[in-house]
Amino acid sequence: MGAHAFVSPDARFVYRQTLETDELLDLESGRRVTLPHFIGDRVIFSPDSSVMILQSFNDELLVRDTRTGDVKLRTRGLDGGTNLLRLNADGTRLLTADGHGRLVLYLLDGRGAPVRVAPPASPAISVGFSSDSNLIAVAGFSTFVQIYETGTRQLITEFGPFSEGIREAVFSPDDAALAVAGRDGGVEVWDLATRRATHRHRFTDQRACSVAWLSPTTLMALGCDGDVVRWELDAPPETIRQLGGQTWRVRKSGSGTIMVTRKEGPSNVIVLDHDTGATLAEHAPDGPRDPYEEARYGLDISADGTRAVTSSGTGVVSIHDTTTAARLARFGSPWGPGLGVAFHPSQAILVTSTYYGELVFWDAHAWERLSTVQAHSGGISDLAISKNGRWLASIGDDGLVVFDLDESLPWESTDALGEPLEREETMPLARKLRLGRAAAKYGAPALALTALEDSVSPVDRARLLMLADQPGVPLAWEQAEDAGEVSPAVLKLVLAEVQAEESSD
């Protein structure tokens, strides 16, 4: 009672579920693997039987290798329900979709997918590239800053120790030094060549939260309780402002200014003069506010210095003008804090993250979602894009992930993702076409037909009907011939094939 069995297309594998355990049977070798029970009743195999996907009642998705039973992917489905799942022929791509025009493509073979480098020694909260893009600094609750070589993804050295861990580590513009904000309140500058600390400063009664270089010899440091320090390295540090409230990040925003994000306080984004600390502009939300949504964590400045992106405690992303601090756009996910945000240095691309370990790529002009790539098993604490635009690094509790953007641009994976439609909103024709073409390309003909409706050619419609195994295929091919898009000889061959398939069913 309560047992279900699912057979792979090649009839070699059987996945059997009971009330307590799951079993994977290899009928060719006789091997039996007992697996933890997965609560759900939907199992789909790839056409070549190499992988299978399981969907639970709460829309969790689990992809397993059928030969070993190993988990290739575990993630939450689309918010609001995943109503289409499709694995490509060799099980290397998983496409999911919902009824609002959202597609998510998961890369299961490692080609074009993020490369998991190594788990951190303890939870990490900061990741950043050197100016020449060759090094990655990872910092967090570990007592050492770890330095990886980008191309080889090898750990090459560590800086420290720092008694209570690190909030942030940032390379200087000339890559000669590393500035470190310590959880014990210390700010230290380390020489990369000698691997020794050359300068030290300590905040009074507060942690050091963030550091930003104004030049190779000038540093800004931010205390977690709002103290702003300007530090010419050949002179004593100077506290130029005490903001009050809990602060999080400081970044150089343009000529003569810096930006600070606040977790708590009367405003959440502040523009300051980096010489005097004077407030030039700030963003204070109007009316009642959700303290988690208004708290600001991640912060990055666009390459042209005109826009800032911040992330909130609820996953909502805000775009601000770096001169006025005015909010220009607001979008994102209600799935909890995805703290990492970064602008691409040369393309109109913004990358954000979700609480469920996904990297989300946005059009930085229209603020439309382009694609979503699963990179971590849980929340992403921070992400960064290298100055040359090639590398993307993200950090979470499960480790450092590095993405080579030159090998596979993730925003080209689906080319059709967009914001979910509001109720009774009409989908624009251009978006319908993008969605339909992407769905057809990645093996979802039924979704393509729904999205494209009458905007496809008669031949393409007939092909999609046949691929989707839906009725009306012979009539669709005849209509394609009537439109002059298929020869009678080809029509006869196609109809014979369709009729043979229908008679064998």
Image (spheres, rainbow, N blue to C red):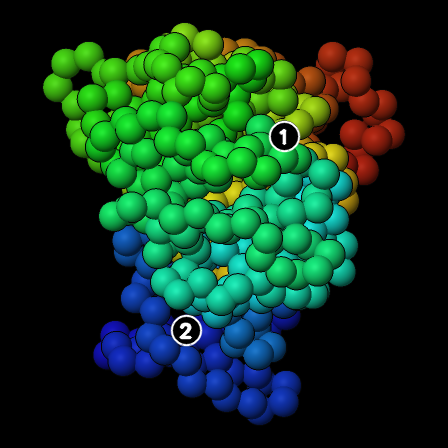
Rendering coords of residue 392 (x, y %): 63, 43
Q: Earlier in the sequence, mark 2 or mark 1?
A: 2
Does 376 sit left or right of 11 as displayed?
A: left
Amino acid of disc 2:
Ala
Q: Residues within 10 Å of mark 2 (few under 14, many from 20)?
A: some
Between 423 and 348, the residue placed more toward the observer is 348
| Figure label count | 2
Quadrant into which the N terminus falls: bottom left
Any mark on residue 215, and which? 1
Query: Which of the 4 image quarters holds residue 288?
Result: top left
Q: Which residue is mark 2?
A: 5
| Residue 46 shows up from this direction | no
Quadrant into which the C terminus falls: bottom right
Outermost bottom residue: 30
Residue drawn at (57%, 91%) of the image: 30
Between 136 and 26, the residue placed more toward the observer is 136
Q: Secondary structure at mark 1?
A: strand
Q: Residues within 10 Å of mark 1 (few under 14, many from 20)?
A: few
Outermost front residue: 235
Rendering coords of residue 300 (x, y %): 50, 30
Q: Secondary structure at mark 2?
A: strand
Query: Which of the 4 image quarters holds residue 35?
Result: bottom left
Between 332 and 106, the residue placed more toward the observer is 332
Outermost left residue: 288
Residue drawn at (73%, 14%) of the image: 482
Rendering coords of residue 156 (x, y %): 69, 65
Between 500 and 147, the residue placed more toward the observer is 147
